[in-house]
Image: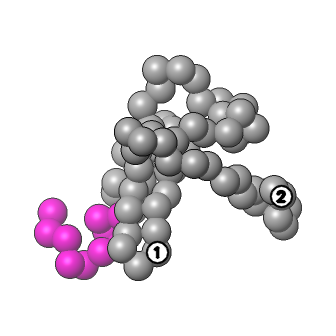
């Protein structure tokens, strides 16, 4: 499913072992290959997010800088 320019949405099914399959279109779009490590972020109010691979370091800096409740 495609939304406004640059946005996308897909549905996935959670299997019996809690696993999901990332749709081929998403894997291609974000260059996700077998064996890649992905970061899954969760916020109880805002939901789940999988940031672009390779952005872990800058993402951690941004998350902890913007959240005053988290101590360094």
Picture quarter containing residue 9?
bottom right
Magenta span includes 45: no
**Residues under numbered marks 1 and 2 in contact, where contact means CB atoms less than 8 Å apart:** no
What residue would you read off at disc 2? 2
> Please, which residue is most extreme toward the front here?
16
Q: Is residue 36 left or right of residue 42?
A: right
Residue at 41% across, 79% down: 45
Relative depth, front residue between 26 and 14: 14
Report the magenta residues as a range. Answer: 63-72
What residue would you read off at disc 1? 46
- Look at the numbered disc 1 and give the secondary structure of its residue: loop
Picture quarter containing residue 3?
bottom right
Separation (CA) of disc 1 from disc 2: 21 Å
Residue at 75% across, 38% down: 25
Q: Is residue 20 visible?
A: yes
Q: Is residue 33 left or right of residue 46?
A: right
């Amino acid at each position: 499913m495609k939304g406004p320019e640059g946005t996308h949405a897909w549905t996935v099914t959670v299997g019996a072992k809690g696993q999901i399959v990332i749709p081929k279109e998403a894997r291609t779009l974000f260059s996700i290959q077998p064996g890649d490590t992905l970061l899954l972020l969760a916020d109880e109010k805002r939901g789940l997010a999988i940031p672009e691979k390779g952005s872990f370091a800058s993402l951690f800096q941004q998350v902890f800088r913007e959240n005053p409740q988290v101590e360094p």
